[in-house]
Image: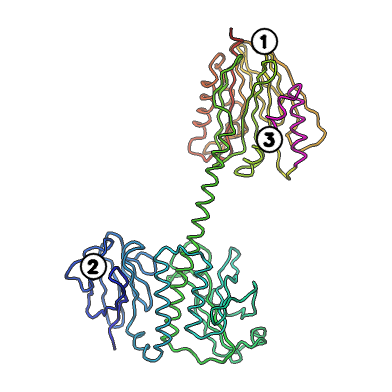
């Protein structure tokens, strides 16, 4: 019986090393049985011990860890074909070859050699981080398996979110791609292999015991089937799991000729090959998901920058008033907005709005409403007419279940304030004598056609404060689930008459932050504060 071996891949190239003593020390130390030169490898990194046919790999407290099939280990029983890595992904890679498998090589040397070479290729691909796209990795897996088994067709089936095996790549002998999205194959065998995590090798479907279950496959002339699970050691996703890892799909091969059963060594090597293939596939899939997430994150950051650019300066000091506003989205981008602009006859227009929904869809609709406001505000004779125009504009481009609440006010000479509220939290007017809600207006925008909006007029005196906020303020919750509510908003602004707008804004935001400390923000929070200070000389 020959000694087990390690096929080592490092900066020195590839070589096969016999494990001819126990313990067998691996590390940078000159006295190590296998000396490797890599900064990831500790002086005494790991050891291999043998007790009869049982071979164990132990980490010796290394700095960067020891991994088997990409999973960190401290003490692990080695199985033929398992991949060993010392340190990071660019560290030292090894393939464990047991003595039993080596003795079997003399019987099926060609097949096992083919598989071992392909497994080494896939292992190297995975070690590089698999910058290749998933389809390329799947194609490489199938072509390698078809060449080694001499099967006629090969399929990689991966499980989807509904726990259904889905065809990903189909190849024929000679590196040909099979067209189509569905194929006549055995349905029972792949499902059984996926559910149990155990391989199936059928030399002749007519002798399989229940040929009626394979009628469709037999009808097109298919006789033999090889099906092995694609297993990775990472946990946490759907699929059969166990001490050996998680099954992400199956590698299915078949042909029209009756086949004798594979030798044990060939079967073991095919399964080891499938494990390497699964790791390469999962690495490619994770790489693609990571790249897609990075693109999405980048797009969201750009969208957030654009949204911030669409908002006016947070602080404004005009002829009649000073204004301060802020919007805090609960996601990267939000559905709240505020805006203000100079109108004819020195009038000052301001608005605060909140569209239905959250995230990118809400941000797009908020930009639409804000642009309509900028276009319609200079044309409206009063706030109610402007709101009607915006409502009609939104209805012309109606989007199901998408609407907006909005409050619009116009402040003119002498402290004349006209306001119209379309379903928004009513503005709160802080006077020296008390607090008043401004509730006149109409329904939300973009929902009902032909509705009429109304506005009300109040006269401000110097020092009067107007506070407008989105429902993210009043509906903010504490850790116990209680809402901030209008009463706490009243308490926050009480006594603020005559304060500068930025001080009032800070007081409201601080009150909400203290109340909801420790609770997740469920909605965008937007506040606009305006102080009327009278006409300056």
| Mark 1–mark 2 distance (CA, rounded to whole Å) | 86 Å
Q: Please tell me which of labels 1 and 2 falls first in the chain.
A: 2
User: Camera-side residue: 30 or 55?
Assistant: 30
Which residue is label 3 attached to?
Answer: 369
Instruction: Kindly identify the residue that appears in the image at 26 percent across and 68 percent down.
Output: 46
Which label sits in the foreground, 2 or 3? 3
User: Camera-side residue: 374 or 334?
Assistant: 374
Which residue is label 1 attached to?
Answer: 414
Residue 485: image quadrant is top right
The disc placed on residue 27 is 2
Residue 51: x and y in percent read 27, 80
In the rendered view, would you say 329 is above or below 66?
above
Instruction: Kindly identify the residue that appears in the image at 64 percent across and 84 percent down.
Output: 217
457 relative to 120 in the view: left or right? right
**Residues drawn in magenta:** 369-397
Q: In which quarter of the image is the C terminus?
A: top right
Residue 433: x and y in percent read 62, 11
Farthest residue in the top direction?
537
Residue 534: x and y in percent read 61, 10
Element on which disc 2 rests: strand
| Mark 2–mark 3 distance (CA, rounded to whole Å) | 66 Å
Q: Please tell me which of labels 2 and 3 falls first in the chain.
A: 2
Residue 475: x and y in percent read 60, 34
Residue 455: image quadrant is top right
Asked if disc 2 and disc 3 are in contact, CB closer than 8 Å, the reply is no
Q: How crowded is mark 1: few (under 14 residues within 10 Å), some or many (20 or more)?
A: some
Q: Residues within 10 Å of mark 2 (few under 14, many from 20)?
A: many
């Amino acid at each position: 019986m020959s000694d087990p071996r390690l096929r080592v891949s490092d900066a020195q190239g590839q070589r096969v090393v016999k494990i001819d003593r126990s313990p067998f020390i691996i590390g940078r130390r000159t006295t190590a049985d296998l000396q490797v030169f890599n900064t990831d490898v500790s002086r005494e990194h790991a050891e291999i011990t043998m007790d009869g046919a049982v071979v164990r790999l132990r980490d010796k407290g290394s700095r960067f860890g020891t991994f088997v099939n990409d999973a960190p280990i401290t003490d692990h029983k080695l199985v033929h074909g398992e991949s060993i890595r010392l340190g990071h992904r660019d560290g030292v890679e090894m393939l464990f070859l047991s003595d039993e498998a080596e003795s079997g090589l003399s019987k099926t040397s060609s097949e096992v050699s083919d598989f071992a070479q392909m497994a080494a290729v896939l292992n190297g691909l995975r070690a590089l981080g698999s910058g290749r796209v998933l389809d390329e990795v799947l194609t490489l897996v199938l072509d390698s398996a078809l060449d080694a088994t001499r099967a006629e067709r090969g399929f990689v089936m991966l499980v989807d979110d509904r726990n259904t095996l889905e065809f990903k790549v189909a190849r024929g002998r000679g590196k040909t791609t099979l067209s189509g999205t569905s194929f006549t194959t055995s349905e029972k065998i792949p499902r059984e292999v996926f559910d149990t995590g155990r391989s199936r090798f059928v030399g002749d479907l007519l002798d399989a015991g229940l040929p009626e279950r394979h009628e469709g496959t037999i009808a097109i002339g298919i006789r033999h089937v090889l099906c092995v699970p694609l297993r990775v050691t990472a946990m946490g996703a759907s699929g059969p799991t166990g001490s050996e890892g998680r099954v992400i799909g199956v590698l299915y091969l078949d042909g029209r000729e009756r086949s004798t059963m594979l030798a044990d060594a060939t079967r073991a090597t095919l399964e080891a090959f499938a494990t390497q293939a699964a790791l390469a596939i999962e690495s490619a899939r994770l790489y693609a998901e990571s790249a897609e997430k990075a693109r999405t994150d980048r797009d969201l950051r750009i969208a957030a920058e654009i949204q911030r650019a669409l908002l006016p300066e947070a602080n404004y000091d005009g002829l009649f008033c000073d204004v301060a506003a802020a919007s805090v989205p609960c996601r990267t981008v939000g559905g709240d907005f505020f805006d203000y602009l100079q109108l004819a006859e020195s009038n000052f227009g301001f608005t605060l709005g909140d569209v239905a929904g959250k995230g990118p869809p809400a941000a797009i609709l908020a930009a639409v409403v804000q642009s309509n406001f900028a276009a319609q505000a200079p044309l409206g004779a009063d706030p109610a007419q402007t709101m009607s125009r915006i409502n009609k504009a939104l209805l012309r481009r109606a989007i199901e279940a998408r609407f907006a609440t909005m409050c619009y006010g116009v402040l003119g000479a002498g402290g004349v304030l006209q306001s119209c509220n379309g379903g928004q939290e009513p503005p709160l007017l802080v006077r020296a004598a008390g607090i008043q809600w401004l509730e006149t207006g109409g329904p939300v925008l973009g929902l009902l056609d032909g509705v009429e909006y109304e506005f009300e007029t109040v006269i401000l005196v110097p020092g009067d404060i107007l506070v407008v906020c989105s429902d993210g303020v009043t509906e903010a919750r504490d850790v116990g689930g209680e809402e901030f509510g209008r009463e706490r908003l009243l308490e926050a602004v009480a006594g603020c008459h005559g304060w500068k707008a930025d001080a009032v804004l800070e007081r409201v935001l601080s009150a909400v932050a203290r109340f909801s400390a420790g609770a997740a923000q469920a909605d965008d929070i937007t506040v606009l504060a305006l102080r009327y200070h009278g006409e300056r000389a």
